[in-house]
Each structure stands twice: as structure tokens, then as C-alpha cells.
Image (spheres, grey):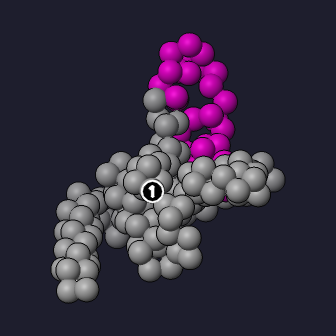
Amino acid sequence: MPYAVTHILLTIIAVDLYRDYAAKHRKYFTLNTVFIAGLAGLLPDADIPLTWFLNLILPGSVPLILTHGGITHTLFFGLIFLAPALYFWKNKKHKFAMYFFVTSFGVFLHIFLDYLLGGGMHGGIMFFWPLSTAGFKIHLLNNLGLNDVPQALDALILLAWLYHEEVKHKIKDFF
Ligand SMILES: [Zn+2]
């Protein structure tokens, strides 16, 4: 399962790269947006402390969907944040809307990474819940026996991003 740091880093980097190279409305992205994106990248795993807490008050009778890898690891959960995003966007509260757009994005990226690398439930990610409880997974790290890799992966991702930031800022200095 990807580490918390991997989820946070990759979401922040993806949002930062989008802002730098693709966004038509860069002014709607603030430092807060990047911070919220990082939080959202980890948000689905809030079900780990939640499971722990529910087991404490309802020992042995916690519904499966509320345990780790359940409802917070579904497309449905990510889509919830699109409603306030569209509402604020329509009402010209663009910065606020962006907070919710990046939250949706962070959740989607999280469950995709869990699907790809290893995470969610043992059966994988229930992408289509509540329509179906079928689980989907590739779980690359488990299948290739690379469970020690994520730690090294974090370091490499961080270095690559720092390099990108450095090059970009140096380039900026010439203009
Ligand atoms: Zn997860």
C-alpha cells in the first residue's frame, strides 16, 4: 500500500504541475489550494482511524463499507465534493470552488493509486459502489513482490519534483 507521504506528494505535485502548465485560471489556485489538495490525497485513509474508533464502540459489528478501503475508497465519495465545487463555481466563488475540485481530484488519485499499487480492501477498490460491491485491483507492488519500494519511491518522487522546481525557478530568473 502506498505510504501516506506518497499520496500527499503525488497529489500536490499533480496539482502544482496542472497549475504551472495547464490551468487557464491560475489565479484561482492559491497556496491553500495546494495544501488542501495534499490533505485530500490522504483523505480516503481517514477510514483507518475511523475503523479503529468504530471497532472500539461497536466491537465485531462494524459494517464492511465503513471499514478501511470501503466507502471512502469509492468514486461515489470523490463525486460528493463536485457538488459544492460546481455550486461555488456557478456563484463566481472560484477560489472556493477550486478547493472542492482539488478535493475530488485528490480522492480520485488516491483510489487510483491504491487500485494500481496496492491498497483499499483485499478484494480491491469498489469503484462502482453503491451500484456494485465488486472489487477491482492491479496491486502492482504486491504482485511483483516490491513492497519495500514505496519508501524509495517517495524519495525519488520528491527529488524529481525539487529538481523540476529548481529548473523552473532558474528559468524564471532569466526573464
Ligand atoms: Zn487508501
Q: Is residue 168 left or right of residue 54?
A: left
Residue 48: % across, % down = 47, 35
Q: Is residue 31 above or below residue 171?
A: above
**For mark 1, what is the residue?**
30
The kind of secondary structure the magenta stretch mainly shows is helix
> Disc 1 on helix, strand or loop?
loop
- Region of the chain picked out in magenta, as a range: 50-77
Residue 117: % across, % down = 42, 64
Which amino acid lies under the numbered mark 1 shown in the image of this protein? Thr
The residue depicted at 46 percent of the width and 70 percent of the height is 19
Quarter of the image that includes the N terminus: bottom left
Residue closest to the eye, 170 or 12: 170
Residue 143: % across, % down = 40, 67
Q: Is residue 153 covered in magenta?
A: no
Q: Is residue 110 above or below residue 163?
A: above
- For residue 25, which quarter of the picture? bottom right
The residue depicted at 53 percent of the width and 45 percent of the height is 44
Quarter of the image that includes the C terminus: bottom left
Q: Is residue 129 left or right of residue 172?
A: right
The residue depicted at 50 percent of the width and 65 percent of the height is 27
- For residue 63, which quarter of the picture? top right
Q: Is residue 145 left or right of residue 155?
A: right
Residue closest to the eye, 166 or 45: 166
Q: Is residue 29 visible?
A: yes
Residue closest to the eye, 136 or 50: 50
The residue depicted at 47 percent of the width and 73 percent of the height is 18
Residue 31: % across, % down = 40, 54
